[in-house]
Amino acid sequence: MNPADPDGVRLAARATVDLPALAACARTCTACPELAATRTQVVPGVVPAGSRLLLLGEAPGASEDVAGLPFVGRSGQLLDLLLAEVGVARAHVAVLNTVQCRPPGNRPPARAESATCRPWAERQLELAAPSVVVSLGLSATRWFLGPTSLSAVRGRLHDAGGYRVLPTFHPSAALRFGPGGEPRRLLREDLALAVVEGGR
Ligand code: SF4
């Protein structure tokens, strides 16, 4: 199956029975014409067996587009470090983006692209069945909670769509404000809370 439009994505995502099958099918997806034409490859989520904590980002960046894996660039390296500081190895944490292809120039995904890719992300979440989802940044947080601001919801667990969702800063914000900045401190604090709440 080669999903080439939103209906094709919906049907294909529904039909997949496990994560490897989903990843294989998503890699052939061309439902967002601009993203399909400009990406190096599709970047499905990574869900280690037995993982209970899932980190949700917005979309792959340049490093992820090349590697075919989510969160392997500078943001991913910071996450690795902070996760280790709160006692969890990255190898035991699932990572996923709301959109599976890199938007050119790292622009935000268009609303239509986000909607078209949603069934891929939703099905991966279903199959991963995490205990806690940490939504990284405003875009991933709104994907779950709808219109809101990060300051209104950050640092607390929310019930959304059958998941326990903990919104926090995106690691790129922590990088922007530097090692002594508030976003990094709060991101670390929120990851620690996610672990305490069962995400390990
Ligand atoms: S962003 Fe998602 S729906 Fe769009 S082409 Fe990539 S995999 Fe398909």
Image: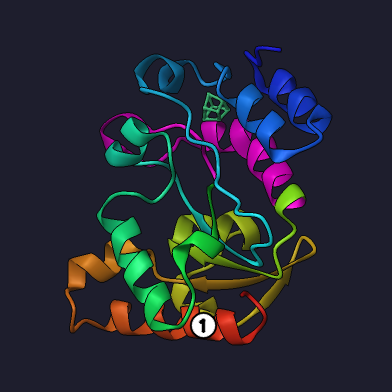
Residue 2 in the image: x percent, y percent?
Answer: 65, 12
Q: Which quarter of the figure is the N terminus placed in? A: top right
Majority SS type along the magenta span:
helix
Near mark 1 (Cα within 10 A), the count class, few <14, some 14-19 or many ≥20, is many
Name which residue lies at 46% across and 49% down.
58
Residue that mark 1 sits on: 155
Name which residue lies at 40% across and 70% down.
169
Determine the image quadrant of residue 186.
bottom left
Residue 112 in the image: x percent, y percent?
Answer: 55, 31
Q: Is residue 97 left or right of residue 81?
A: right
Residue 190 in the image: x percent, y percent?
Answer: 48, 81
Q: Is residue 125 magenta?
A: yes
Residue 107 in the image: x percent, y percent?
Answer: 32, 38
Of helix, strand and loop, which one carries label 1? loop
Q: Is residue 112 above or below residue 173?
A: above
Q: Which quarter of the figure is the C terminus placed in? A: bottom right
Looking at the rendered structure, the kind of residue marked 1 is Gly
Range of residues picked out in magenta: 98-126
Name which residue lies at 82% across and 28% down.
15
Q: Is residue 36 left or right of residue 147?
A: left
Q: Is residue 108 magenta?
A: yes
Q: Is mark 1 within 8 Å of ligand 1?
A: no
Q: Is residue 159 above or below residue 27?
A: below
Name which residue lies at 44% across and 83% down.
86
Ligand 1 quadrant assignment:
top right
Determine the image quadrant of residue 78.
bottom left
